[in-house]
Image (cartoon, rainbow, N blue to C red):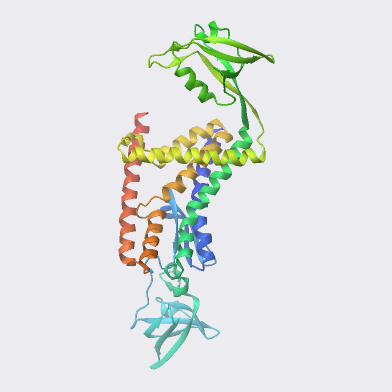
Amino acid sequence: MGTIQVVFMTVLVFFVIVTIHEWGHYFFAKRAGILVREFAIGFGPKLFSVKRGETRYTLRLIPAGGFVRMAGEDPELVEVQPGQTVAVRLKDNLITRIYLDRLDERTGTIRGEVESLDLEHKLQISMLVEGEAETFAVHPQALIIARGKETQIAPIDRHFGSKTLPQRAMALFAGPMMNFILAFVLFAAYIQMAGVTEKVLVNTVQSGMPAEQAQLQSGDVIDSINGEKIGADFNRMIDIIGASAGVPITLKIIRDGAAKQLQITPVADDAGVGKIGVTPKYETRSATVGETITKSASLMKQMTVYIFQSFKMLITGQFKLDDLGGPVRTAEVTSQIAKQGFVQLTSWTALLSLYLGIFNLLPVPALDGSRLLFLGVEAVRRRPLDPNKESMVHFIGFAMLMLLMLVVTYNDILRLVRGE
């Protein structure tokens, strides 16, 4: 790939795995009837923003994730208070617009002082209009307009917290779930493109090593070692040879369609591991539908185990700061893999999507896993936790995650400057 293609594919990888995650939250929140105020990719200042229907779609400066802002999760940004003078616009006897500023410029409106209001349950406002008390019904999708911004009201039945436990749990779990689905689909696409390995062949033979002395040749098929079939499992071949330093082994090979047996004694390297001096190449074929499904599931399992092993090493202190990578290092590795071709990039994107799904299910404050844990506690207690306390826990967790991201990003930049 050229430089422009590499940059484009790197950005696309991040965009796809984050967007599919947030779309999962968005889709199941909307399905439950929750008002989704914003669908954002990235954090920080807005780079691009457009509103479609009830939701504002934004692209933000810091490409380190995204979020779906649902009504009731955070305090509403705009409030109307009793005693405040407002202007309202009616349609079919329902208030559709509530103006909080520049009242003299609002034509076709009714202006008055708010006596009382309920924009969540009763959906009505009582106002003093020219000295007379009047009560108006409010449209469930009415807009509050202040400082040039429109904020849609959220009746209580549109709040996240008003939904059943299963609906809220699904809206939270749907993000990681979509990452798992994407990972499976991408692993399947990778298997279809890469094919299924059927045989391990000798690629090159190193001069002066046991393989050359035994007259192994490029193109020989490794059929078995000491009677154990190798098939496509080159790693098993390495394990057997590695454990046989100084011990003769019997290789059954296929050369030009004919079977031959060779006796080879691996030599020990500096670490005491047996070597015979060959590199492999593989004979592949197209995968069947069944093989694509089973091998995709197998890759999902293998990579999941690998990810949890990495988490374990992090918890037990086997990782140093330099071993951790933030968005900068991830982008660097992604660009390097993109240069290897679309097939390798597909596999890497699947791994990143799987990692994002698993990471978000960790019981860390501010992540989906922590919020699901709070729902589990609510189910056991049969009553919700204090939303203010829960919000504080998630806020602290988010701040700590952002701090960690800043530290590893700073370390990544220093590493790039040092040319490591």
Query: Where 150 sits versus 298, above or below?
Result: below
Question: What residue is at 48 percent from the left and 84 percent from the top?
Answer: 137
Residue 383, how many percent across, how many down?
A: 36, 69
Q: Return the residue nearer the eye: 271 or 261.
A: 261
Position of 271 with respect to 109 (left or right) is left
Residue at the limit of the structure toward the front, as seen here: 227
> Dividing the picture into quarters, in which one does residue 274 lie?
top left
The residue sitting at the right extreme is 257
Q: Position of residue 313 (x, y in %)?
A: 35, 37
In the rendered image, the vertical position of residue 407 relative to residue 416, given as above or below: below
Tell me where residue 168 appears, x and y as whole percent.
46, 63
* Rendered residue at 42%/50% (across/down): 360
Spot occupied by residue 391 in the image (x, y as percentages of width and height):
33, 62
> Residue at left 45%, top 58%?
172
Say which quarter of the image contains residue 131. Answer: bottom left
Quadrant in the picture for the C terminus: top left
Task: Residue 210: tell me if it is visible.
Answer: yes
Q: Is residue 44 visible?
A: no
Q: Is residue 78 above or below residue 327?
A: below
The number of numbered badges drawn on the structure is 0
Q: Residue at x 58, y 45 (%)?
A: 185
Quadrant in which the N terminus appears = top right
